[in-house]
Amino acid sequence: MLSSQAKNKILAGAVAIITASGAVWGASLKMSQEEQEKLRKSLDATPEEKINSLLLARENLVAKREMLEKQIKGIEARQAEKAELVRQKEQYQKQQQSTQGYGYQSPDDKQR
């Protein structure tokens, strides 16, 4: 048979599972009721209330769009700066290679 300690662990696990499942079920039930209430309110709303609600939603969407456009412009500016730095670096490296190819020796090379 099972020891009393094992029985206690099984009982504690069962209670935890029941509690968790009850919490999840209750939360889903509440969300369902809230969705039904929102639907009922939107169906019962007057045309003026619906228009006001849509205008408010539009304002929020326009604000989000402006924020996203600003972020995109910032990203594009950083990308352009990075591309310019890469171009300058490549140009500098080509310049260094071309000066080394013509027998130019820097003071460091002369000491070697």
Image (tube, rainbow, N blue to C red):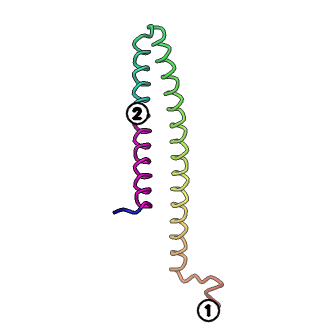
Q: CA distance from mark 2 to mark 1?
A: 78 Å
In this rendered view, identify the residue nearer to me: 65 or 12. Answer: 12
Q: Which residue is mark 1?
A: 112
Q: Amino acid at mark 2?
A: Ser
Q: Amino acid at mark 1?
A: Arg
Secondary structure found at label 1: loop
Whether 24 is among the magenta residues is yes
Asked whether, in this view, residue 75 is left or right of residue 16, the answer is right
Question: Where is the C terminus found, in terms of image quarters?
Answer: bottom right
Image height check: is 86 above or below 18? below
Image height check: is 30 above or below 103? above
Count of numbered badges drawn on the protein: 2
Q: Position of residue 63 (x, y in %)?
A: 54, 29
How many C-alpha atoms fall within 10 Å of the one at disc 2: few (<14), some, or many (≥20)? Answer: few
SS majority, magenta: helix
Q: Position of residue 46 (x, y in %)?
A: 45, 7
User: What span is colored magenta in the figure?
Assistant: 4-26
In this rendered view, identify the residue nearer to me: 19 or 47. Answer: 19
Q: Which residue is mark 2?
A: 28
Q: Residue furthest bottom?
A: 112
Secondary structure found at label 2: helix
Question: Where is the N terminus found, in terms of image quarters?
Answer: bottom left
Which residue is at 44% across, 43% downward? 19
Q: Position of residue 30 (x, y in %)?
A: 44, 29
Which residue is at 50% across, 14% downward? 52
